[in-house]
């Protein structure tokens, strides 16, 4: 059951990152996504 909580948190973080980086370069955005997926 806790796995759903972690998945939901990841989704929220990705959405937040999307909004925060939407004004930045797309390349930097994808780099952040890759780093995020690699760390988690």
Image (cartoon, rainbow, N blue to C red):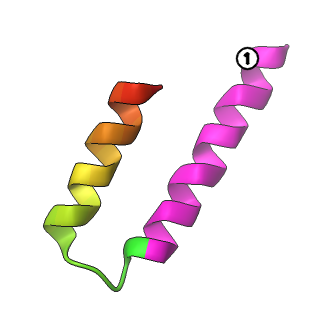
Residue furthest left as drawn:
27
Q: Quadrant of the N terminus?
A: top right
Q: Which residue is pictured at 28% across the width and 80% down the height?
A: 24
| Rendering coords of residue 8 (x, y %) | 71, 38
From the image, tell me which residue sits under label 1: 3
Q: Which residue is pictured at 39% across the width and 73% down the height?
A: 21
16 over 5 or under it: above or below: below
Q: Find residue 11 and report its image quarter.
A: top right
Graded by Cα atoms within 10 Å as few (under 14), some (14 to 19) or many (20 or more), the crowding at tag 1 reads few
Image check: 17 left or right of 4? left
Residue 22 on the magenta segment: no
Residue 18 on the magenta segment: yes
What range of the chain is rendered magenta? Answer: 1-20
Q: Which residue is pictured at 65% across the width and 30% down the height?
A: 7
20 over 23 or under it: above or below: above
| Rendering coords of residue 37 (x, y %) | 38, 32
Q: Main secondary structure of the magenta part?
A: helix
Image check: 6 left or right of 23? right
Image check: 18 left or right of 3? left
Residue furthest bottom as drawn:
23
Q: Which residue is pictured at 33% across the width and 47% down the height?
A: 33
| Rendering coords of residue 27 (x, y %) | 14, 64
Image check: 10 left or right of 21? right
């Amino acid at each position: 059951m806790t796995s759903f909580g972690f998945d939901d948190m990841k989704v929220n973080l990705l959405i937040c990152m999307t909004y925060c980086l939407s004004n930045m370069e797309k390349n930097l955005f994808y780099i952040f996504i890759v780093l995020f997926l690699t760390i988690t």
